[in-house]
Amino acid sequence: MRKLEVFPGIETERLILSQLKEEDIPFVTEYLQNKIFSDLTSNIPYPYTRQHAEFWLKISKEAFENNTGYTFALRDKEGKIMGAIGLHDREDDKAELGYWMGRPFWNKGYVTEAAIALIDFGFQELECNKIYATFFLHNPASGRIMEKIGMEQEALLKQHLKKDDEYFDIMMYSILRNK
């Protein structure tokens, strides 16, 4: 992943993608307190606390500084955080796409809009060759987003993730720079 010296800002038709800030912590904590986020993702705990949000902000800043990832706050045009989206380096010119959106903003196409912009950023600015994402089979809405942004189903990874002492199959989708 090519290193950028300054955290980038990306603007789409309805969104601003920018670096996370301390003032986002209360909103992140509020959005992620719903157990559905823990049920639908591999790395959001329940209950979600302010300490979790503070730690996430810290590791997101460290990932940028160490050139291992870019976590963007997904904001409306007024600058209010609605969710987050990121690309994280998996070496060999690959990056993993991940995202979450606050429940009040579901089913409005925001994640799809942001993900299209982030894939372009990953290929153009970071010089990734491949971007991939995974989802739990019980979260097909995430898979539909991956299809809408041009990703193709690559593999069913059986019992690939363990969460709360249970093993889960996950589906992997990907997109290549030169397909």
Image (cartoon, grey):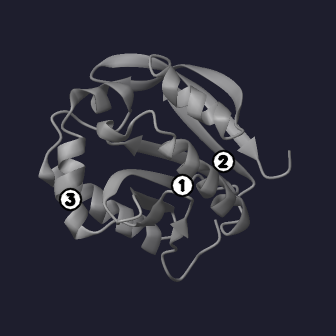
The image quadrant of residue 21 is bottom left
Residue 12 appears in which quarter of the rendering? bottom right
Identify residue for label 1: 87
Q: What amino acid type is highlighted by mark number 2?
A: Ile
- Residue drawn at point x = 36 percent, y = 68 percent: 61
Please name the residue that numbered disc 2 is placed on: 131
> Is residue 41 visible to us here?
yes
Identify the amino acid type marked 1: Leu
x and y percentages locating residue 109 in the rendered image: 52, 40
Q: CA distance from mark 3 to mark 1?
A: 20 Å
The reply, left or right, for residue 146 in relation to residue 53 is right
Which of these two is toward me, 87 or 29?
29
Q: Secondary structure at mark 2?
A: strand
| Residue at 44 percent of width and 16 percent of height | 138
Give coordinates of residue 144: x percent, y percent. Answer: 59, 27
Q: Which mark is residue 13?
A: none
Q: Earlier in the sequence, mark 3 or mark 2?
A: 3
The percent coordinates of residue 137 (x first, y second) are 50, 18
